[in-house]
Image: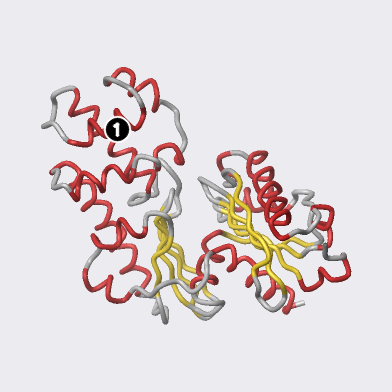
Amino acid sequence: MLSSSDNKEIFLGIDGGGSKCKAIVMSGDNKILGTGIAGPANPLHGYEQAINSIAESAKLAFKDAGIDESELGHIVAGVGLAGVNLPALFKQMSNWQHPFKKMYLTTDLLVACLGAHDGKDGAVIITGTGSCGFSYVDGHSYIVGAHGFPHGDKGSGAWFGLQAAKQSLLSLDGLIPPSSINDKILALLKVKDDVELVEVIAGKPAAFYARMANLVFDSAEEGDKLALAIVNEGAEYISHVAKQLLKQHPPEISLIGGLTPRIKPWLDIDLQAKLIEPLYPPEVGSIIFAKQQLALQ
């Protein structure tokens, strides 16, 4: 076990989103020592859940690294969270009596961008449970979207899942032609008709709907007309987000998030050619952010 005196060279990175919270422990020379994953950590969907997920993921990462969780109090943590682009939530999370020696808090957007481009200027399009675009150029942040589900987050996993549910209900009612989405969604949710479907989906959060995104892409790849319309609409939105970001003249642009492999082939061809693979995941970006903040002090 590392003693607390050794931990000045140990950093914790947190990436908290609508579906899960990822933690990583890294040495000062950027070796990965341990990782952990816990539940959702977007304070917009619940402050207590967010802080519990951050603490749990950190403890799991420490356990994976072979470090006793009592050492959390000696660690500098970079924490990137969904939702804290809203000032009230940033203030609430900043006031959290966290278990770390220091916590540097910022948005999940900035840490995603810093990770993707190794701390340098660039842009990212996030297509996970939620969706948004973000660029960081010459110290200036620019955000497209990030308005949250269901009123925003078009082209996200949650959005695709919601469209699947809405269109399936219309189809099951005979108001639009049948779609292969119908059988897939009923099977996934283990229900037999539209009434049971409504009972299961009513009031569910973004992460629940995001579970249904893949079936839309499956049906689209099979040539289903309804699924193709949904996928093309979502992909067109993400392509428009990218065009807005490129007006900021970022040196590089990356597509990140769990939906990336499914949606990338549907984006504008010229955009696909511009996309580069992200260098590091957002949780590493959180550590980059923490190191940058330490350097400023």
Quadrant location of the C terminus in the rendered image: bottom right
Q: Residue 273 falls in which quadrant of the image?
A: bottom left
**Is residue 13 toward the left or the right of residue 200 in the image?**
right
Nearer the observer, 103 or 241: 103
The answer to whether residue 174 is above or below residue 247 is above
- Residue at the spot x=28%, y=70% of the render? 272
* Quadrant position of residue 125: bottom left
- Assess disc 1: are there few (<14), some (14-19) or many (≥20) residues with their C-alpha within 10 Å of its C-alpha: many
Q: On screen, 9 above or below 199?
A: below
- Residue 122 lies, in percent from the top left, at 46, 76
Residue 119 image offset from top left, x and y in percent = 56, 77
Q: Is residue 28 left or right of residue 140?
A: right
From this viewpoint, is residue 91 visible?
A: no
Please state the total of marks drawn on the protein image.
1
Q: Residue furthest left?
A: 177
Residue that label 1 marks: 185
Q: Tell me the residue at 31%/56% (across/down).
A: 262
